[in-house]
Amino acid sequence: MSNRSDNHQTVPLSVLLKRELANEKIERPEIIYGQASQSKKGEDFTMVKTDCQRVVGDGVSTYSVFALFDGHNGSAAALYSKEALLNNILAAIPTDLNRDEWIAALPRSLVAGFVKTDKDFQERAQTSGTTVTFVIIEGWVISVASVGDSRCIVEPAEGGVYYLSADHRLECSEDERMRITSSGGEVGRLNTGGGAEIGPLRCWPGGLCLSRSIGDMDVGEFIVPVPYVKQMKLSTAGGRVIISSDGVWDALSAEEALDCCRGMPPDAAAAQVVKDAVGAKGLRDDTTCIVIDILPQEKPAAPLPPPKRQGKGVFKSMFKKKPNESSSTVEKEYLEPDTVEEIFEEGSASLSERLDSKYPLCNMFKLFMCAVCQVEIKPGEGISIHSGSSSNPEKVRPWDGPFLCTSCQEKKEAMEGKRPSGSMKTFPYLTFLFFFMVVCSYYFCFLILIKRKVSFNSSVLCFLQVGVTAIVISQSSSPFICSLRALTITWKLFMSGNVVLLSILVPFNFSWEFTQHDPFGHPT
């Protein structure tokens, strides 16, 4: 680790006071936005909140929030994230911070908010999932947190394209693929039988082609909600931000999206981006776009000063004290430059790395509060985020904060592959239902064996019983594919009249199939 004191420079007190004054009276940009969408599945949702306040009631410390939620396997996760995510992020930000400290605290708070939202949603026992691109604009600083394959780009007024999000498709990152396999998952393509594989890389069990999302509890805890976070400061000339779902980026590049709407107001620009994306490849998926223009405030023209009368003030100017040139030079050297700057960037999936305090602020987290869910922890009950970590043995000290509560520590260990996913713990009633249906299947098959005849009604009933049993067993995979395989086996046994084999092999086949293979033919 580099020693910062070697390059330490003393900043004059006058400059610090001017900088602090400038932070509180910073010139606010004008935010203009527009959005457009074409729906295929109805699983894209957006959130727009302007004029939010860091300090309630002051009317000065305002910021804006824009977010895009692209759901899959239903819209429940997207809708829940839309309602809960912002509150969870704000709850993780300490109070009584000035503007610079508030912006510096955002990366850690964004991570905590994403993980808490995912944890709370999974407790609702719903298997939906969603990608999230979450943007906070405070002054000229843009902070972006993202999971999934929606993206955010910005084009400053000076030109160029900056990518403020990461694409978490398995095709795009070898590091993410290695993380998943080391945590107990498997990465591969869809197996159609006979060794043929098609489609994009997917994570098994479950078949999700993303490595990060909120929700997706039926896939596995190695699909993490830890976001990629990037912060960027624009110059006072401003720029244009585009947030879009994968329906846009599958058809258009960043440059094409910016070029097709150049010179248009944000609402027309968003509609044009969606139109071009749909026109290029058709409406294959929900296609949503948000365009945000960050512009300098228009200032009224300053009135011309009255003409000065010659001779007045001549002697006064002769004896006027000249400014200290060295002082003004120092002030110019330390004042922040009006240029585009990349302030922060971090994409690690390790929760201990992301929640560790990396900014030089005092008391940025309360020692007896969980760093994720913000619940109070009694002294001695908190578990350090460094506990069990082996990334840097010299730095790891289990008694160092921040701390996690027991449930958040279990979530962290599951994400790191140190314990199995909590799906069966979340659904104990499904375990009971599974055994109940197996017993029913045995009993019904026994009755068929005694009567020695198979009626149409009885075959349909057994057919449905076996299908329900397969769905229960496959709660961590695709119910449709699992039940289809089990029903096919059952139907063949019925048609061949092998009632004895039916009563013996069907439950045995379930146990074997779902412990040895996932429903798509990949070994577990």
Image (spheres, rainbow, N blue to C red):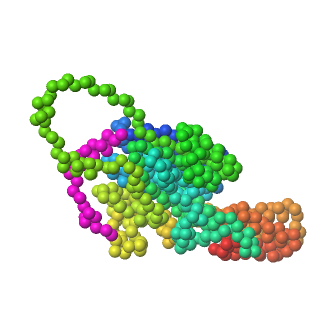
Residue 507: x %, y % from top left: 73, 72
Q: Is residue 474 above or below residue 109?
A: below
- On the rendered structure, is 266 left or right of 504? left
Depth order, front residue of 415/158: 158
Which residue is at 55% across, 69% downward?
Answer: 174
Q: Is residue 517 above or below residue 249?
A: below
Q: Quadrant of residue 357?
A: bottom left
Residue 457: x %, y % from top left: 85, 60
Task: Pick the quarter of the image with the N terminus.
Answer: bottom left
Task: Pick the quarter of the image with the C terminus.
Answer: bottom right
How many numbered circles does the render carry? 0
Residue 511 seen in the current view: no
Magenta-span inclusion, residue 124 = no
Residue 4: x %, y % from top left: 28, 64
* Magenta stretch, residue numbers: 1-27
Depth order, front residue of 80/30: 30
